[in-house]
Amino acid sequence: MTPAKLSVLLAIALAAPTLAQPPRPIPVKVVVVAMFELGADTGDAPGELQYWVERDHLDLVYPLPAAYHAARMNDSGEMAILTGQGTAHAASTIMALGLDPRFDLSHAYWLIAGIAGGCPEKVSLGSAAWARWVVDGDLGYEIDAREIPPGWPTGYVPLRKMKPFEDPAAPLDGQAYALNKGLADWAFNLTRATTLQDTAHLKEIRGNFDGAAAQKPPFVTMGDELSSSTYWHGKLFDAWAAQWVPYFTGGNGEFATTAMEDTGTLQSLQFLANAGRVDAQRILVLRTVSNFDRQPRGMSAAESLANQRVSKYGAYLPSLESAYTVGHVVVNELLTHWAKYSGTLPNAEPSAPSGP
C-alpha cells in the first residue's frame, strides 16, 4: 500500500466517529399543549393551537408520525403541540413527543392551555383558572341513572368501593394529580391582574345563570379540574363533580373546570419524568371557560346540551383569547428570563383569595 493510500484510509478512520455522532437535541424551553384545532394551524377559524402559532410565530414544523400532529417551534425555544381530543390521543401524543430524540425536554416548562366547561359557582364565562389538582372522572363504576338506589346522590362509584364517596378514599395511580403548588401560585400571581375580554354577548348569556361567580366579568383565578373523556352536562353532574374532586384530593381540591384530555397528558408526563426525560415539577394547567357545565335557568339539561358544540359555545372565542392572553404572560416571563428559570423553578407563597 502506498503512503498516499494509507493517509487517505487513516483520515477516513479518524473522521468516522465524528460522522457517526447524532446531532445534538434541540433544547426546548416551553411546551404549550393544545388539544384541538378546527382546521389548519393558521388562517382560518381558530381552535386552541392557532393563536399560539400565529402570534408567537411558531413557523418551524417538526413532523411527528407517531403522534396526532406535528410539533411547531420558534427560534426562542417555544414549542406547541396539538394532542387531539380525549385522554387516549393526549397520552399517546405526549409520549411520542417526550421520547423523540430530536428534542431536549429536560428543562422544559409545560403549559396545558385550553378551553373548558366551568362551574358557575366558581368561575364566569371567559375566565381563566390555574389548577393545583387534576382529577380523573372516568375511572370508576357506573349504574344507569334509572337504576340508582334511593339515597344515592349519583350512579358513579369509585373503583373498589361499594357506594358513592365511600370512605376512606383510595385514589388509584393516575386518578389524582397534584401539580407543583408553588409554580401554580406563581403563575396565578403573575397573571391575576390580566384584563380579560368581556362583551355584551357574554353579559347576556351569564344573566341566565345562577351561581356565586356566574354574573362576574371574566377573571383569573385558582381552580381545579375534573378530566373526563365523557362530556357530561347538567346541574346534577355539576354537583357530582363538586364532590368527586375533594373526595380524591383529601379535601384539598376545589372543582372549577371540566375538560377532557389532561389526565392523559399528565400520565405520560409522569412516566417521562420517571425516565428522566422531563421535569414533573414544571407543569402548569390553565383552563378557560367557554361554557357553563350546567343548564341555564328555566331549561332542562338535555335542551342545554343540544347547544353545547365546539365553536358554538357562548364564550368560545373569548375563552380562546383568555387562554392565549393569560398563558402568554407566563410563557413570555419564562423565555425573557430563561437564565433565571432554566435551573431554578419559580415559586410563590400561598396566594391571597382568588378572584377579581
Image (spheres, rainbow, N blue to C red):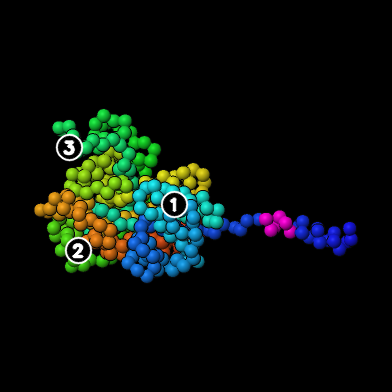
What segment is highlighted magenta in the picture?
15-20
Q: CA distance from mark 1 to mark 3?
A: 37 Å
Q: Name the image quarter holding the C terminus.
A: bottom left
Residue 203: image quadrant is: bottom left
Amino acid residing under circle 2: Leu
Image height check: is 240 above or below 26? above
Is residue 201 visible in this depiction of the protein? yes
Image height check: is 324 above or below 271? below
Could you say whether the residue bearing mark 3 is in a helix, strand or loop? helix
Q: Name the image quarter holding the N terminus.
A: bottom right
Residue 16 forms part of the magenta stretch: yes
* Foreground: disc 1 or disc 2: 1
Q: Are marks 2 and 3 in contact (CB under 8 Å)?
A: no
Q: Position of residue 142 (x, y in %)?
A: 26, 36
Mark closer to the chain start, 1 or 2: 1
Mark closer to the chain start, 2 or 3: 3
